[in-house]
Amino acid sequence: MAVAKSYGVSKIIAFDIEPARVEFAKSYCADDAYVVPKDYSGKDSFQFANEFVKTVLEEQKLPYGVDVAIDATGAEVCMQMAVFITKPHGTYLQAGFGKHLTLMPMGLMAAKSISIKGTVRYGPGTFEDAIDLLARGKIDIAPLITATYPLTKIQDALAAQISREGIKIVLINQE
């Protein structure tokens, strides 16, 4: 979100299943953020994703959808939501890793002429761009780092990560 904002994205909408992360997203960079319910109330994931996204687009006054949707979760329903929220001729970027095989609305992707891209985190120039953004003060990563642990406390760090405490946990090679 911070990188998108630093490059001039005019509106950022975030989604998460955890209310604390949604609140963090709003306080950090998102213009708005939504808690996605874990229970679809008997609906299949496609129906839920479509209905949830329609409500968001109406609320955000974006009748055609968004230019770019990025899924960083790899969760099937989130990937489906990203397709539903992307406007015709928009771009869908898959950055999160999930199941090897996933049900996706391919007919809708084709009908909307969505460009699909994938990434495995780091590409050519990634580190240079990140360093440049930090050096110019375009992004602030300090709010992201919510805990640090020395390597001797790696079990505590893993337990905190598993329980989803905080945003980013950093391991340091010293006490």
Image (cartoon, rainbow, N blue to C red):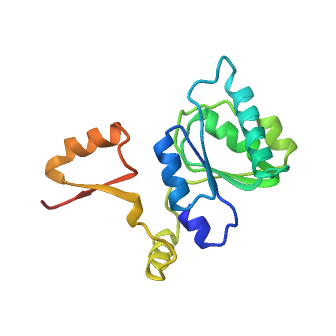
Residue 90 sits above or below residue 21 on the image: below
Quadrant occupied by the C terminus: bottom left
Task: Work out which residue is located at the far right of the displayed protein and give it.
Answer: 111
Between 22 and 4, the one nearer to me in the picture: 22
Number of residue marks: 0
Percent across and percent down for residue 20 are 46, 44
| Left or right position of 55 against 41 | right
Quadrant occupied by the N terminus: bottom right
Residue 120 visible in this rendered orientation of the protein? no
Residue 93 visible in this rendered orientation of the protein? yes
- Image quadrant in which you'd find residue 164: top left
Percent across and percent down for residue 120 are 52, 53
Percent across and percent down for residue 112 are 85, 46
Query: Residue drawn 61% across and 33% down?
Result: 76
- Image quadrant in which you'd find residue 4: bottom right
Query: Residue drawn 63% across and 53% down?
Result: 32
Residue 136 sits above or below residue 173 on the image: below
| Left or right position of 1 against 117 | left
Between 108 and 165, the one nearer to me in the picture: 165
Residue 104 sits above or below residue 136 on the image: above
